[in-house]
Structure formats: C-alpha cells, structure tokens
Image: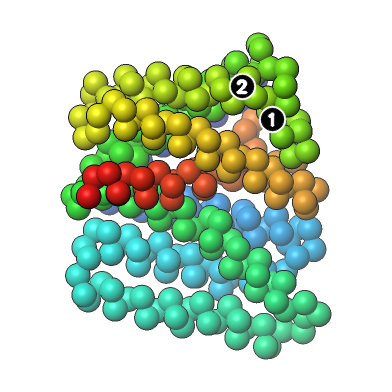
C-alpha cells in the first residue's frame, strides 16, 4: 500500500507538470507516453503468441501523433501535406507481411492497426484538447485529468464501502453499480468546483463533461480488462510499482478523450 501511495503521488505530480509547463512539454510528454502505451500493448500481444508488426506500428504511432499535433497547432496547407506520410507508413504494415513467413498475416495486420486505433488516436484527441480554440490552453486537458481521477477515486471509495451490485462481473468482478454512480457524483462535484476557476465553460457543460468521462472512462476500463482477460494477463506491465502498467492507468482516457473532444469542439465552435 505504501509503494502504491508513493508511486501514485509522483505519478500525479508528473502528470500535472506535463500539462502546466507549456505546449512543448505537453506535446512531447504525451507523444512519449502514447508510444510507451502502444509498445506495452504490442508486448502484451507477443506474450500471448500474437505477432503484431511492432516496429512498423510504433513508427506509424509516432507519425499519427506528430502529424495531427502539428495540424491542431498550425493548420496550414503545408502541414496537411504531411498526411501523405501516413499513406506510405500504413501501407508498410500490409506490405511487411509479404516478406514474413506467417500462417496468419492478417491477424498480425489487424492487431497492429488495432493498437493505433485503440492507443494512439485517443492520445491525439487528448493532445488536441489543449488547442481546442487554437492557442494552447492547459485548462481543458487539466480538467479532463482531474475529472477522470475524481471518477476513479469516487468509484473506488464508494464501491469499497457500499458496493453490492456487480457492474460487469464477466470482465471486472470488483466493479459495482454503486461505485459507478459514486464516481459520477464525485466527478460531477469536482466539475462544479472547476467551473469557478476555469471560465471557458459554464458549470452545466463542465458537469456534463464529467458525466461523459465517468461513463466512457468506465467503459474504457472494462474494455482494457476484457483485453487482458482475452490474453490471460492480470496487469498490463510493471512500470508503475503497485499500479501495474501504463495501460492500467490510462484505460479510462482511451475511450473518453475522443468523446469529450468531440463534445467540447461542438459546443465551443
């Protein structure tokens, strides 16, 4: 428990620092983080006997993040031309299988592409939150993280004290409906407090964002649990002592970030 608490404390400090230290630190940190998560995803697959094209996948993940990061920062025609790189790099995922002696090439291709969709694209959406109105504004990604953590904490505490009814026992035996509702309530309260300091949105929109994060963050958690159970693995890694791997910490972001970005983009434009 002590190890978990110490790791959690430094994890929160690093995450907060990465958001508030400016657009370059923010962009580079989440590029690095997305590649580490993608690498963790591919390594888990290899442990289970699946053989995704790791190097080609990582190169594509790098290109996807960089290109879309440049587009949201500076949406000039010259930047859009970089999309041509993706047509070549993604094609390489398919072409590479021609030169490998594999009995199931399209399974390898499918899992390689699945990593890009499941891991890299959500991180590009999260990065885009900071540039929602053009200029860098750390309020949106910071609020997202605070609401995500509030939901996780609320769900854990309420579920531990009051949890009785299983939410989705087949994939996550410990999650309960009581914990899920508690997470929404705690996240909603934090959203209301945030509205007093971050004036970009009214309190109603902040609270609705909290509900979206709670719902889709929980679904992301369940999907990551389903993935681990499908390959018979308990934790996604050991990079965070007491907390498991990076995917265990960012599973809620993977589904919630694209949904929240889309919602905020629609209401602010």
The percent position of residue 149, horizontal first and vertical second, equals 48, 29
Q: Which residue is mark 2?
A: 179
Q: Residue at x 46, y 36 (%)?
A: 213
The percent position of residue 36, horizontal first and vertical second, equals 53, 53
Q: Residue at x 60, y 86 (%)?
A: 95
Q: Would residue 87 be seen by someone viewing this image from the given angle? A: yes
Marks 2 and 1, how far apart in space?
9 Å
Q: Residue at x 26, y 50 (%)?
A: 131
Q: Secondary structure at mark 1?
A: strand
168 on left or right of 58: right
The percent position of residue 16, horizontal first and vertical second, equals 37, 33
Nearest the camera: 190 or 51?
190
Is residue 24 depicted above or below 251 in this figure?
Answer: below
* Residue at the farthest bottom position: 98
Nearest the camera: 212 or 94?
212
Nearest the camera: 68 or 164?
164
78 on left or right of 65: left
Q: Quadrant of residue 172?
A: top right
Category of crowding for the residue at label 2, using alpha-carbon neighbours closer than 10 angstroms: few (below 14), some (14–19), many (at least 20): many
Q: Quadrant of residue 146?
A: top left
Sequence-first disc among 2 and 1 = 1
The percent position of residue 15, horizontal first and vertical second, equals 41, 36
Is residue 265 depicted above or below 210 in this figure?
Answer: below
Nearest the camera: 150 or 54?
150
Q: Which residue is mark 1?
A: 167
Q: Residue at x 56, y 73 (%)?
A: 56
> Are circles 2 and 1 on residues that touch, CB within 8 Å?
yes
Category of crowding for the residue at label 1, using alpha-carbon neighbours closer than 10 angstroms: few (below 14), some (14–19), many (at least 20): some
163 on left or right of 183: right
């Amino acid at each position: 428990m002590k190890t978990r608490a110490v790791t959690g404390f430094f994890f929160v400090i690093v995450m907060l620092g990465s958001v508030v230290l400016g657009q370059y630190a923010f962009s580079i940190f989440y590029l690095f983080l997305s590649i580490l998560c993608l690498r963790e995803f591919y390594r888990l697959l290899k442990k289970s006997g699946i053989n995704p094209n790791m190097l080609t996948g990582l190169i594509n993940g790098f290109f996807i993040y960089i290109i879309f990061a440049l587009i949201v920062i500076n949406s000039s025609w010259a930047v859009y031309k970089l999309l041509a790189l993706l047509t070549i790099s993604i094609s390489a995922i398919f072409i590479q299988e021609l030169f490998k002696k594999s009995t199931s090439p399209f399974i390898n291709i499918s899992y390689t592409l699945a990593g890009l969709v499941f891991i890299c694209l959500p991180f590009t959406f999260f990065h885009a939150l900071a540039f929602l109105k053009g200029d860098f504004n750390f309020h949106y990604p910071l609020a997202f993280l605070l609401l995500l953590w509030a939901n996780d904490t609320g769900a854990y505490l309420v579920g531990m004290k009051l949890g009785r009814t299983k939410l989705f026992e087949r994939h996550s035996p410990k999650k309960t409906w009581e914990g899920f509702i508690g997470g929404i309530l705690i996240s909603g309260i934090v959203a209301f407090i945030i509205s007093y300091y971050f004036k970009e949105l009214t309190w109603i929109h902040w609270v609705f964002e909290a509900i979206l994060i709670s719902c889709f963050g929980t679904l992301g958690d369940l999907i990551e649990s389903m993935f681990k159970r499908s390959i018979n693995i308990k934790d996604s890694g050991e990079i965070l002592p007491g907390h498991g791997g990076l995917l265990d910490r960012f599973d809620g972001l993977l589904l919630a970030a694209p949904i929240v970005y889309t919602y905020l983009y629609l209401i602010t434009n």
